Image: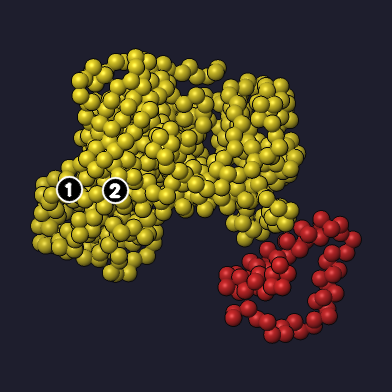
Amino acid sequence: MKLNIEPNLAAADDFYERLIAAHRDLSEEQSAIVNAKLILLLANHIGDMDVLREAMEAARAGVA
Amino acid sequence: MKTYTHPRFDYVRSPDQDSQQPAHHALIIVGAGPVGLTAAIDLAQHGVPALLLDEDNTVSLGSRAVCYAKRSLEIFDRLGCGDAVVAKGVGWNVGKVFFKDRLVYSFNLLSESGHQRPAFINLQQYHIEEILIRRARDTGRVDLRWQNKVVHVEQDAQRVRLQVDTPQGAYALTCDWLIVCDGAKSPVRHLMGLESRGPVFRDRFLIADVVMKADYPTERWFWFDPPFHPNQSALLHRQADNVWRIDFQLGWDADPEEEKKPERVLARLRAMLGERDFDLEWVSVYTFACRRMERFRHGRVLFAGDAAHQLSPFGARGANSGIQDADNLSWKLKLVLEGKAPLALLDNYSDERIFAADENILNSTRSTDFITPRSRVSRTFRDAALLLADRYPFARRLVNSGRLSVPAVLVRSELNTPDAEIFAGRMVPGAAATDAPVAVNGELRWLLQCIGGSFTALYFAAGMSELPVEAASGIAALTLDRISVDTRVVVEPGNPIELPPGVMKLEDYEDFLIQRFDAAPGTFYLLRPDQHVCARWREFDLERVRRAVLRATCND
């Protein structure tokens, strides 16, 4: 597995707060756009297709 | 129509219709569209007379396929009508993508210099067909019969039997080989009980051809969700004669008959074009499918173009891939007809062009999914990519308004001899040779004018004062083989090297060839009659070249 699933965020609570704050005062539709942009920006940063595929599989697991 | 009058081609009674026995032809082609005409001209140039049957008596009724890619122009060049097509067409290299009311980015499809032809020209299909019909007649070897409709087909191991309907009744014909290029609905495919399978997309598009004097630059403009056509897409292209092609996505629920009404179309156009003067020339509403036949050869019947595979229009891959089908098939059929290659070479036509069709279907399906998202989340990601594309170059690569037609690189073809040495660049075995400027006897020419038609080769001899003995004798010997190879020797400008009689010298005056083929002195490229690379080596070796020719013709 190439996806890093070990704890890697130095300040997890700070990150989480910022993530929620990034959606403050947005409609559902606007939030969806922000999330999609965020995913595309991060995917480009990661670049590695194996990592991205593993992350997509992990995200979908148990949902459907 | 205001800018074009359709020619009427008369039905002429053929002596074949009065024959006691069905008249026999080596080759019959069904369908005088761009693909059938390309095949007929190509085979005629190879010395093979072609009987071309068409059920109609004129050229394409609408502008239909308007974008002809560089590779198609290069094929038309080889067929002797590239200049006529380019002179009448409108060349373009730049595309622009808009989202809502903003330009998101623009792209240049031909960013490097040193090519004779632009990335694309736009030209109405009826103009293309007229030019090809003229060229077919000029060959003197194409017998074009109008209002000849094939109504029955059967075949055995020896021949194909046809029943053909005409204004003066039916008559029978037989042939060794039948090439079927009768379009997406392919009546002949149906007569033979064969299917083309794949998904139909639940969307409708309106095409309008508009005559207007507009000062827009000659570029491809694509809008996602524009203010003049909210929530849908639109596309603008310039064609010849001040005719502009406009595509509007309508959605699945649109009523095709309602949407074709002039007042309805004019309202849409006014929203887009404002109060400028324009005339409506032609309107059509269409849906599309991406599908193909399981194989393109059925015994003595060969399928090409839309009859064999159908694509979405995004990417201009329909007519362009059909023209490449004809380019791929003609030389193979010629060798089979001459008894110089086994039938396996025709199965290879099917294999290579199915590989290309699958690539085209994949690309055009992906474009369709981006342009007409099929779910809410798909729409959200699309809009996110468009919003990012404005500022971030990485996101422009995600935006898909059509991946425009480029020739398939036939990397998996059995005709290729795998590389035994290291090469860089794009001229891998299976790739269509790239163009470059060259000088021949002091005159500016283009590489692609100097190769193809039969097997040809490039021998790189920059810096050499004479050819090595083995190369000189080998190059001469190859011209006398059963399947001959004509070699061009590539040198730096002004190199006075003496060459064997009949060997063409190409001066590579800006190193384009050396760079594009990653060549060093002694490098040898073997090219198929359709200009695709099939083998290459760092050193000339006659026996290796001969083995590669046998392999490239299924004779190994």
Task: Inspect the image, locate mark 1, and give the three-letter code of the amino acid beneath it.
Answer: Lys
Name the chain letter of the residue that bears numbered label 1.
B
Give the residue at x 76% y 63%. A35
Do discs 1 and 2 belong to a common subunit? Answer: yes
Taking the image as shown, residue B549 lies to the left or right of residue B187, namely: left
Residue B38 vs B241, above or below: the answer is: below
Residue B189 percent location from the top left of the image: 41, 38
Chain displayed in yellow: B
Name the chain letter of the residue that bears numbered label 2.
B
Helix or strand or loop: what does disc 1 sit on? loop
Of residues B392 and B491, the one nearer the viewer is: B392
Taking the image as shown, residue B415 lies to the left or right of residue B397, namely: left
Give the residue pinned by disc 2. Answer: B346
Give the residue at x 60% y 44%. B201
Q: Quadrant of residue A46?
A: bottom right
Of residues B491 and A20, the one nearer the viewer is: A20
Q: Which quadrant of the rendered structure holds the N terminus of chain B?
A: top right
Residue B350 vs B249, above or below: the answer is: below
Residue B236 percent location from the top left of the image: 61, 36
Visible residue check, residue B444 = no
Helix or strand or loop: what does disc 2 sit on? helix
Taking the image as shown, residue B353 lies to the left or right of residue B157, namely: right
Task: Inspect the image, locate mark 2, and give the three-letter code of the amino acid beneath it.
Answer: Leu
Q: CA distance from mark 1 to mark 2?
A: 12 Å
Visible residue check, residue B235 = yes
Chain displayed in red: A
Give the residue pinned by disc 1. Answer: B340
